[in-house]
Amino acid sequence: MNKPYLIAVDLDGTLITNFDHCDEKSFGLLKALSKDNYVVIATGRPFRSSKYYYDLLGLKTPIINYNGALVQNPSDLNFEKTMITIDRCVVINLIKDNEDILLNVFCEIEDDIFLWKETDEIVPYLHITGGNLKVGNFDLILNGDPNGAIVLAKLGSEERLTKYLKDKYGDGVNIRFWYNETLAIAEIYNPLTSKGNAIRGIAKYYGIPMDRTIAIGDGHNDIEMIQTVKYGVAMGESHESLLAVASLQTLPVSESGVYHFLSDFFHVNS
């Protein structure tokens, strides 16, 4: 019998496009491979909006959410949950001190959503289904420390936000940006949050050596994951910073890149 691999796969930009369009060919192969290997979803999404794909694959493994800030196994109560947070005051003070450049902010405690204000541009990022949404002044509604925060800000505000957090919190909080045509989107997170750390923990739990680990992703938030495993794979059209560190590359999600890499790796007949 062949020894199992741990296969960690991102969702958006890797298996999914436009928030909900699945690469059915890759999903089909992953489901087949999960019978003899440990397939793990590793996503920046909350659990509530990734559970559908977890169930679609028929998984019984842990799932990595919020880029590693939340790791749990809904099918195995013996698996110890990982819950990494930032201090609630980071989000509260961020808004108070930078309101002039912020368009909106939201944060989450597991599947509870806390939103500063209701605006159209925030809707695609909320993944409201299955979550408990509260809207208003974070001083009043944010009842605990969140797993991180998402900030929508004016273009050109990146340097100011980065300096603000560095000056106020030093190395206690990290920030990274991605963009669309009209605004800067920032993720604020605990430096301990890492898909790579989560994968190490899962591999240890199952007794899988790191030389039998595979990770596939497309974004800046996949860098540590790609660097942690033996076989780090960047999707075609990945973020340039990920392409710079990935040892392997496959086709874009639009061309079923996950399927093509894994079918070649495991010698699966098309």
Image (cartoon, rainbow, N blue to C red):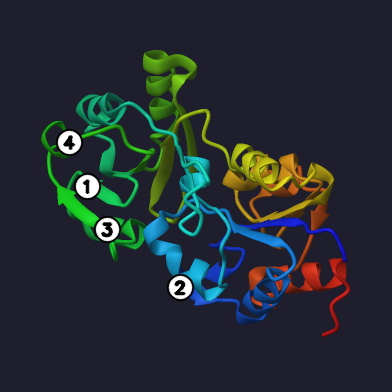
For the residues carrying marks 3 and 2, which lies nearer the camera in this image?
3
The amino acid type, in three-letter code, at marker 1 is: Leu
Q: Between disc 3 and disc 2, whose residue precedes? A: 2
The amino acid type, in three-letter code, at marker 2 is: Asp
Q: Between disc 3 and disc 1, whose residue precedes? A: 1
Asked if residue 267 shows in the view, the reply is yes
* Residue nearest the observer in this picture, 178 or 46: 46
Q: Say which element carries label 3.
A: loop
Distance from label 3 to label 4 (Cα)? 17 Å
What is the quadrant of residue 98 in the picture? top left
What is the quadrant of residue 265 in the picture? bottom right
* Residue nearest the observer in this picture, 132 or 245: 132
Q: Between disc 3 and disc 4, whose residue precedes? A: 3
Residue 242 lies left or right of residue 109; in this view the side is right
Residue 131 has which mark? Answer: 3
Q: Mark 2 points at which residue?
A: 20
Residue 138 has which mark? Answer: 4
Q: Between disc 1 and disc 2, whose residue precedes? A: 2
Q: Between disc 2 and disc 4, whose residue precedes? A: 2
Residue 217 lies left or right of residue 67; in this view the side is right
Distance from label 3 to label 2 (Cα)? 17 Å
Q: Name the residue under label 1.
A: 115
The residue that appears at 66% across and 44% down in the rendered structure is 225
The amino acid type, in three-letter code, at marker 3 is: Gly
Q: Say which element carries label 4.
A: helix
The amino acid type, in three-letter code, at marker 4 is: Phe
Locate the N terminus and report the quarter of the image it occupies.
bottom right
